[in-house]
Image (tube, coloured by chain):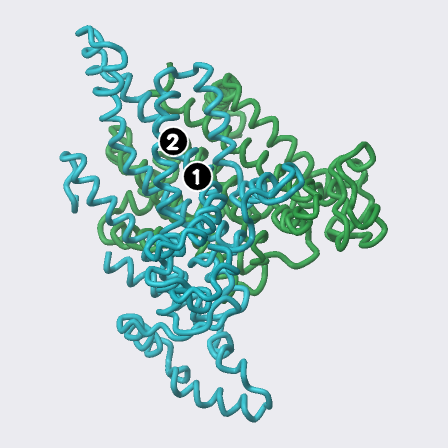
Amino acid sequence: MIFTLFGLSAILFVLTHAAGNSIILAPYLAGAKTPAQKATITAHMTQVLHLNQPEYIQFIYYLSNLLHGNLGYTQTTIYSGTVISAIEIFFPNTIMLAVASVVISVPIGLYLGKLSGVRKDGTIDQTSRVLTFIGIAMPAFMAAEILILLFGTTIILPKAILPSYTGTFNATLASGVPWIQNGVTNPTHIPLIDALIHGNMPIFWSALRHLVMPVATLVVGLVAVVQRFMRTSLVEVLNLDYIKTARSKGISESGVINTHAMRNSLLPIVTVVGIMLISLLGGVVIVETIFNYLGLGYWLVTAALEFDIGGIIGGALMFGIMLILGNFIIDILYTVIDPRIKLGD
Amino acid sequence: MYIFSEEWREGLKTKLESLKLTLSILFSSFSGLFGVIIVAIYIAIAIIVKTDPSLLGIHTNVNVLIAHPVSLAGPGGMGYPPSKQYPFGVIGTPYGLNLYTGVMKAIPVDIWLSIIIVVPGGAIGAVIGVLASYYGGWFDEILMRITDIFFSIPFLVLAIVASATIANSTTTFVIILIIIWWPIYARLVRSQAISIKELTFIEAARASGVKDLKIIFKHILPNTTAPLFVQFSLDLASIMILLSSLDFIGVRIIPPGLPELGYLSAMGSQVLVIGQWWGLIIPGFAILLFALAMNMIGDAMRDALDPRLRR
């Protein structure tokens, strides 16, 4: 895991430093007006950021900065300040979105997968197979925009029932509320939870309504992945000998499926969480950007479009760390659930 | 001459028979047949647009998205919904874009980008994977660590970072995507090849003095192609979704003005809120249908190749 983290930071270093110094210096030159000012700032920052040193020295400085938690500054239209404080604000909201969509999609996916797997090639199976195919093939932005068309506009329904482009909660409710500063809620930075902590119901409902469409968009893709995996796994298990034994002992069909087959076919579902994680983190970037949801993905895309190097490195690093930690937890879960697997093999 | 020899004719016969078997399995399932037909239509459209676009009723430059910026704005700049005259509708002001020509022009661009990323990436990954599994040792160890690193960051995030920093042209961007795409194939082929290289026929080949490289490329690699093709078909779909998503969120990877389905969808999403639903649904559906067909082909191939699921 340490090696992977090192590799991740190395990739990001190569990507951000291979293009030359102009992109690294750009944020500092934003305030400079005359060419003379620019020259002074360039000379000064080249010294301070060690840009005149060879690349491997720069890499050592970069790594030491990462280890000290010194990630520099970000200056984008959605946030200006240190990268660390930006992560502190955006990360909890991304986690909120990710956790909510996983918690909703996994049970639905498992249930639909069970329905399909039990009656392979039946009507339910065929229908849900077509639906999961569509769920997997549908680009996240299309699912999001269809939801907006249905619920966020007055084109199909007479009234827009859900907010679409306004971020995490209705900002007009924030005026005069002491625990909201500059549109950021305290202490957890997740409006939904903070409103609950402070007992502010209007903001709570607003935050909940703002979560519905982003979460629903992610759920469409995730349910499809889980359903497909559950179905394959259950079909495989139902063909095994011990199921035949259970059936020949006279155990009822629901008993065979629920106590014998389901438990074993749930084992590989841990793998699917790993697969889900990649598609989830990719989807989060798209969904946050479309709904202007203040999370890591929206920040990363904004930083990339505005060539803000602090946001690019900080955002990408966080996504990498989430994936690495997620996979590490999955590896541990594996050994807990399936005693046949030993860590380190 | 070699090509008329008995051996060659025998080889051709076996190859044709195995191809016939593969195709019959693929076409025996509805989803496989559906997928192949849809993909064939897309490829036909792409070829026609690139050779003789007038056959499809396109009389403007196929490399430029909007040929008539103002003349097609429609009543009140609201465009036209899909109708007999404009089968896919028209996006109104500020684009004035006939979606039929837009989507048709975009299809070859999207398909070409997917192929040019997946095929070289897959080929490089397959070669590296099979070499690593055959030679093992430190080479294999280093390879697996490198793939670990590439798997530690979502592709979309890496692509966004690359597009903002070093990818200043479509060519560099494509090269970068190839570089981040090969590890999947390296792992896939390696996992297959590791079990194949222990089989008796490889041992026999080695015992009869066949050279290492010939064993690798003639005996091991061809036996890993089945899961490779499944992954190819799935990836052609995911690359198209990835590229169009990048274009949709504004991370432009192709020169402005060149038609691309994600860019068309982004245009459509801007006019969605004022009622022009077709601007998003039509290009989005073009992506969805291609990805659906590719997934169905991949799934049918997997079912056909997996004896545990065959009944």
- The cyan-tinted chain is A
Q: Is residue A196 left or right of residue A77?
A: left
Q: Residue at x 37, y 80 (%)?
A: A54
Name the residue beneath numbered marker 1.
A219
Image location of residue A241, percent across then percent down: 21, 15
**Chain of the residue where label 1 is placed in the rendered structure:** A
Q: Is residue B229 left or right of residue A164?
A: left
Q: Earlier in the sequence, mark 1 or mark 2?
A: 2
Left or right position of A185 against B163 = left
Residue pictured at 50% horizontal, 92% vertical: A40
Quadrant in which the N terminus of chain A appears = bottom left
Could you tell me residue B303's position as x and y percent? 41, 23
- The residue that mark 2 highlights is A108
Tell me what residue is drawn at x 55 percent, y 86 percent. A32
Of all chains in the rendering, the one displayed in green is: B
Query: Is residue B227 among the parts visible in the rendering?
Result: yes
Considering the numbered disc 1 on the image, is that residue within a helix, a strand or a loop?
helix
Residue B202, image quadrant: top left
Chain letter behind tag 2:
A
Mark 2: give few (<14), some (14-19) or many (20+) Cα within 10 Å.
some
What residue type is disc 2 on? Ile
- In the image, residue B94 lies at what x, y percent? 76, 55
- x, y percentage for residue A191? 40, 56
SS at mark 2 in the image: helix
